[in-house]
Amino acid sequence: MTTTPGSAVPSRRLVLAALIAIAAVFAMSLGLTYPLLAIILEGQGVSSTLIGMNTAMTPLGIIVMAPFIPRITRRFGAWRVAVACALATALLLLAIGAYRNVWFWFPLRFLLGVTIDSLFVISETWLLQMAGAQHRGKLVGVYGTSLASGFTIGPFVLSVTGSEGWSAFGVGLAVMLLTAAGLLLIRGRVPEQASGENISLLQFSRLAPMLLLAVGVVACFDQVALSMLPVYLLDAGMTEARAAFAVGVLVVGNVLFQYPIGWLSDKVPRRRVMAGCLVLVLASIAALLAAVATAYLWPVLFVLGSSGFGIYTVVLAELGDRFEGAMLLAGNAAFAMMWGVGGIVGPPLTGTVMDALGGIGMPLSLAAMFALLLVVIVAAPNRPRS
């Protein structure tokens, strides 16, 4: 990373601010795209099953791409790959808007997962490489807040633009071009992967199985909460409007508490913070069973969202503590792959349990996953920096 003498700190802060801003606008584009495409397909009379299969192409692209990211960035350079992916994402959005056909969208949404995966992995790796150990949790918390805010803002943008015409796609295209422009501004000020190193995801997984399990569990929670929580609440007798509002409350907890949780993990051993978040999650799930028909439901969901998503913030900070260079990039790629796996596995698995046990199968499934993670975290030894 090149800086002039005496300007290292301002330059570093500027680059970190740019990375966080890029994450926010990029996440806003994704938060806009997911409901936009679902609404368009629904309006075309496409079945819910086919819409779900079409949506799953993006996490499938993430899973397939993840193992290749370390090799590709080593070959072409992380900055070049990031810019290429931002521009490719813009072109994919343009093609999706021009050809509104569910079958045409299958390969396009798969490729969208490929480009999205690369952008997230590279940006998170840069952030962790540039963050000092004493403030890494706090910085990751700011990054998590920007991502969550972007995803939250996306649907509100759609409520203004609507799904007809090109307005929503125009916003998505503009956001991706802004992402590319932001990357141009930080050229030469972000670290590159060391040449000659090629670390596979399998090599990384042997060093950090607990971290990967945590990412998979949080990914399951993310997808299950967004897709199955409304089903559980409707089964419990809640109206559609209140069920949708409940998901919003859960997301607000995610937005507001990433920074405090990250800050706390800089002051207290990160494993203890993870364990504390898990205890809060399990307590919230237990309270959820009794609070569905009461006013206590809202604070319960707020705590559930903040503590559940906060686990990822702490796990990402620990990844930066333990690994550097090519191994850190491989770790971020492995995280992305586990996020894709969790997103694909979580909802169908939970849905199967709900078919067998009724609505209560949703909180019981989440409780089982988080309880397993808590046992593993408590039992796992602390690892030295690799």
Image (tube, rainbow, N blue to C red):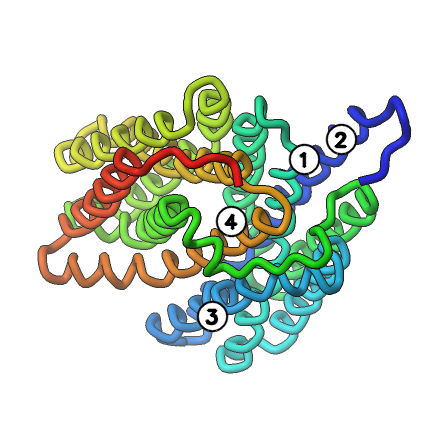
> Given this view, does label 2 or label 3 mark the residue nearer the observer?
2
Q: Which quarter of the image is occupied by the N terminus?
A: top right
Left/right of residue 29 with respect to residue 367 in the rendered view: right
Does 166 sit above or below residue 152?
A: below
> Given this view, does label 3 or label 1 mark the residue nearer the observer?
1
The residue to which callout 3 is attached is 57
For the point 55% across and 33% down, the residue is 140
The residue to which callout 1 is attached is 130
> Given this view, does label 4 or label 1 mark the residue nearer the observer?
1
Give amino acid for label 1. Answer: Met
Q: What is the x, y in percent for residue 269? A: 41, 23
Count neighbours of disc 1 (C-alpha within 10 A) and say few if under 14, some if 14 to 19, many if 20 or more.
some
The residue to which callout 2 is attached is 12
- The mark nearer the N terminus, 1 or 2, is 2
Give amino acid for label 2. Answer: Arg
**For numbered disc 2, what is the local secondary structure?**
helix
